[in-house]
Image (tube, grey):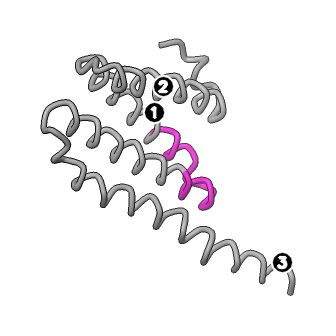
């Protein structure tokens, strides 16, 4: 993989979209091997982006929400491929964790930042 894809977080995010789309297209077309194979680089790049964004809490929380979303999405995909949707329930905690990440940001941290800049 060319290192230029990781020259910046933005370039990594753009490449991450490609990975995610290939994973999801594979899912919708029923290509089990490619779909599951693409899950691994997709989640790995999401984790890498979150790690690189760790110095800004707002960015980190959004990136962690994406990691949770991809985990839930991957579990759902695997459930549909091999377990006749019985694994969807396992995905729910990951979706909730993602919502908690962004919820914390928008309901707690962002209002605190607003109060600090007003006073």
The residue at which mark 3 appears reads as 117
Query: What secondary structure is marked by label 3?
Result: helix
Q: Residue 19, labelled with which disc?
A: none
Query: What secondary structure is marked by label 1?
Result: helix
Residue sticking out furthest to the left: 83
Mark 1 and mark 2: Cα distance apart in space: 13 Å
x and y percent of residue 83 in the render? Answer: 13, 38
Above or below, 107 relative to 9: below
Q: Tell which of 84 and 103 is nearer to you.
A: 84
For marks 3 and 2, the one nearer the N-term is 2
Say whether residue 98 is left or right of residue 33: right
Q: Residue at x 41, y 28 (%)?
A: 24
Say whether residue 35 is left or right of residue 45: left
x and y percent of residue 41 in the render? Answer: 38, 27
Cβ atoms under marks 3 and 2 closer than 8 Å: no
- Residue 105 magenta: no
């Amino acid at each position: 993989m060319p290192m230029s894809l990781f020259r910046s977080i933005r370039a990594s995010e753009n490449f991450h979209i490609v990975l995610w789309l290939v994973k999801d297209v594979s899912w919708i077309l029923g290509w089990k091997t490619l779909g599951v194979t693409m899950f691994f680089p997709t989640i790995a790049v999401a984790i890498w982006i979150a790690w690189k964004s760790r110095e800004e809490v707002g960015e980190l929380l959004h990136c962690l929400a994406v990691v949770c979303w991809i985990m839930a999405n991957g579990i759902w995909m695997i459930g549909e491929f091999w377990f006749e949707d019985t694994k969807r329930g396992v995905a729910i905690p990951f979706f909730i964790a993602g919502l908690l990440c962004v919820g914390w940001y928008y309901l707690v941290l962002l209002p605190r930042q607003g109060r600090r800049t007003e006073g």
